[in-house]
Image (cartoon, rainbow, N blue to C red):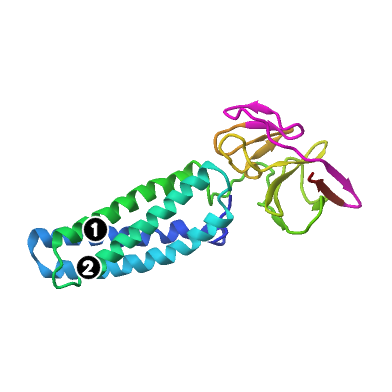
Amino acid sequence: MQSKANIKGHPLHPILIVFPVAFFTGTLFFDCWGAFSDHAPYFDTAYHLQVLGIFTALVAAVPGFIDYLRVVPPESSAKKRATSHGLLNIGMTIMFSIACIYRQSLNAHITVLLLLETAGFACMAIAGWMGGTLVYRNQIAVHNLYAEAGKWKEELIDTPGKSFVVAASGELKVNQLKLVIINGKRIAIGKTAEGYVAFDDHCSHKGGSLADGAMICGTVQCPWHGSQFSVTTGAVKAGPAKEAIPVYPVSEHDGKVYVTLE
């Protein structure tokens, strides 16, 4: 799913996160070098890198938090992973911030300083591993394109009722999908050769976004692990998913497409 915090389609969080990674790595490196060589200027360099690392980590956290709230599918394995990723990054920033304050104490000991920074570095390394998994496995902030898919479409509906207008009759082409969030409920709207369909955006395997998948010949495929479902009955057509997905009644009249939620 495309990042909400982006510039011309380029997600900001992975662009910005390289700066605190570089600065914090440099901090630990120069403090270790300073301890080994007993050369004070190395500690000064480490301090300045540490300050820059803390600042850039806070900046990088902003687009990351936006995507956490608005892009990562709820109640999914990716949401759990993204939560751990965020908490580890917070831990990283806290460890390096404590180290930054501690190093200015007259009684600061290099061993304690290095332990704090090593703990922060460990948090950063694990968080980075999880961040990579979120992108490459869960495809968070990845804009998937396939033949005739068109641009990503998303609509938010926040009105009471049971029947909702989710699209114009000619809005989607055959095999195109659209995500509609109706009062917090994520519904994938698609168009087959027979007409419009509506089904849960939540893959029953690990919670991947089906609106971000591919739909061909009445079958939608989850982009995470390849589970396939019938878009008319919700039945599983290929695993690893074992449970069907809910589908919803769709009607089309007066140039509009309606979905009914019971």
Residue drawn at x 75%, y 38% as measured from the top left: 247
For residue 235: magenta?
Answer: yes
Q: How far across and down, in percent of the image, does residue 18 sit?
A: 37, 58
Tell me, for residue 116, which label it has, or none.
1
Kindly indicate the quadrant of the structure image that contains residue 47.
bottom left
Residue drawn at x 44%, y 59% as measured from the top left: 15
For residue 216, above or below residue 209: above
Q: How far across and down, in percent of the image, does residue 221 sit?
A: 63, 35
Badge 1 amino acid: Leu
For residue 228, above or below residue 72: above
At label 1, counting other C-alpha atoms closer than 10 Å, the crowd grade (few under 14, some 14-19, many 20 or more) is: many
Q: Earlier in the sequence, mark 1 or mark 2?
A: 2
Residue nearest the viewer, comparing 115 with 198: 115
Badge 2 amino acid: Tyr
Residue drawn at x 50%, y 59% as measured from the top left: 65
- Residue denoted by label 2: 102
- Tags 1 and 2 touching, CB below 8 Å: yes
Locate residue 9 relative to residue 41 in the image: left or right.
right
Q: Looking at this view, name the residue that lies furthest to the right.
A: 254
Kindly indicate the quadrant of the structure image that contains residue 14.
bottom left
Tell me, for residue 24, which label it has, or none.
none
Magenta stretch, residue numbers: 228-255
Locate residue 85 relative to residue 190 in the image: left or right.
left
Residue drawn at x 88%, y 52% as measured from the top left: 255
For residue 104: magenta?
Answer: no
> Mark 2: which secondary structure?
helix
